[in-house]
Image (cartoon, helix red, strand yellow):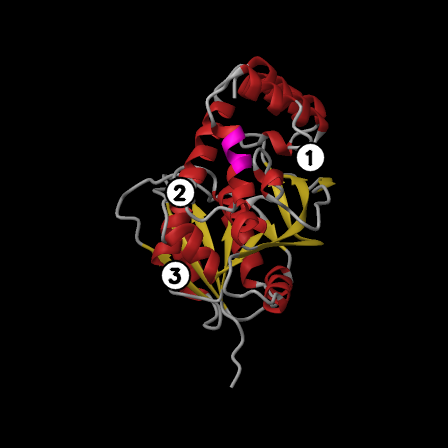
Amino acid sequence: MHTAPTVNILLATYNGSRHIRRQLDSLLAQTYPHITIYIRDDGSKDNTVEILKEYIAKNPSEKKIVLLPNNGTNLGCPTSFYQILKECDAADYYAFCDQDDIWYPDKIKWAVEKLSKHPQKSKPCVYFSAYEYYTDTGKFLRQSPPQKKHISLTDVLYYTPASGFVLVFNEAARQELILTVRPGKELHDRWLLRGAACFGSILYDPRCSAAHIRHKEAVTAEDSGSFSLVKSFLINEIGGTAMTKSKKFLYHFQKTFQGRLSKSDLKTLALFTAKNTPARQIRKLFYPRRLRARFAGEIAIRLLFLIGKI
């Protein structure tokens, strides 16, 4: 008898009392029924945990909510997400979830449909969808940019085509890319997408499945408009240490999967992780493939190659 695929939703919370109710309501409103919501709170100082316990007490039995113990430790992001993956029961698919976004009702249903039809179930497979940007006052800003049908390693070296909250992935990805290796401190979305690009498949769905809420206190560079994006690049990348850290993360990925990477992917990684020489700087400066989706980001990274910062 064929059983429907199960999905674990992995929700990491921290001081999220202002937004967590709307997010939990959107998770419980999912049209796909076979889900379990695993939550790890990272030591909130507000009443987030009390709200979580309130929902656990009243949630419908067919959509189980499990609050994992945190043993009094604050792990931060992405380690808190990885810890949930280690502690949750096995499922067919897993979905990262932020505390302050809103999922549309068919989000998990669409992901399961796409992933279930993919033929290579024994290899890591990561699904992601388009999404919409809103302010915390409910004003629509824009839709996420369209993505390539085929995403390769080059596309995820210095760019993340999808944020963590729209990623849904299979058990093979959980085992091969997280449980049996040490992902380190690189953000979970980039780590998983890079691993799937090298060892499996990435499925893009152009339908919008969630609202990404932009809060004034927590706006990333990719969330920003063109002017703010350029400003962010100047401060964090040209003048700061963001990209030197990014190079270290890239090298950690290379070391972790050294024995499994194809010759082509190893060659690509070696170019961008090796110590700078004038020849390598020139090769990176004139690298024939685009490395970032937005023009300002592409100019910034070529400038970093030119001055030898990465």
Q: Residue at x 46, y 43 (%)?
A: 16
Q: Nearer the viewer, residue 144 or 121?
A: 121
Label 3 vs label 1: CA separation? 38 Å
* Left or right: 147 as drawn, with respect to 251: right
- Residue type at mark 1 is Ala
Q: Closer to the N terminus: mark 3 or mark 1?
A: 3
Q: Residues within 10 Å of mark 2 (few under 14, many from 20)?
A: some
- Residue type at mark 2 is Thr
- Residue type at mark 3 is Val
Residue 307: quadrant of the picture:
top right
* Left or right: 38 as drawn, with respect to 165: left
Q: Nearer the viewer, residue 13 or 149?
A: 149
Asked if residue 29 is positioned above or below residue 159 in the image, the reply reads below
Magenta stretch: includes residue 280: no
Instruction: Report the residue marked by disc 1.
Output: 293
The x, y position of residue 212, in whole percent, is 62, 44
* Left or right: 96 as drawn, with respect to 212: left
The x, y position of residue 230, in whole percent, is 66, 21
Q: Residue at x 44, y 29 (%)?
A: 248
Magenta stretch: includes residue 269: yes
Q: Secondary structure at mark 3?
A: strand
The x, y position of residue 297, in whole percent, is 65, 26
Instruction: Report the residue marked by disc 3.
Output: 66
Instruction: Report the residue marked by disc 2.
Output: 256
Asked if residue 275 is positioned above or below residue 16 in the image, the reply reads above
Q: Which residues are magenta?
A: 267-271
Q: Check whether the beta carbons of the residues at disc 2 and disc 1 lie within 8 A of each other.
A: no
Q: Closer to the N terminus: mark 2 or mark 1?
A: 2
Q: Nearer the viewer, mark 2 or mark 3?
A: 2
Residue 25: quadrant of the picture:
bottom right
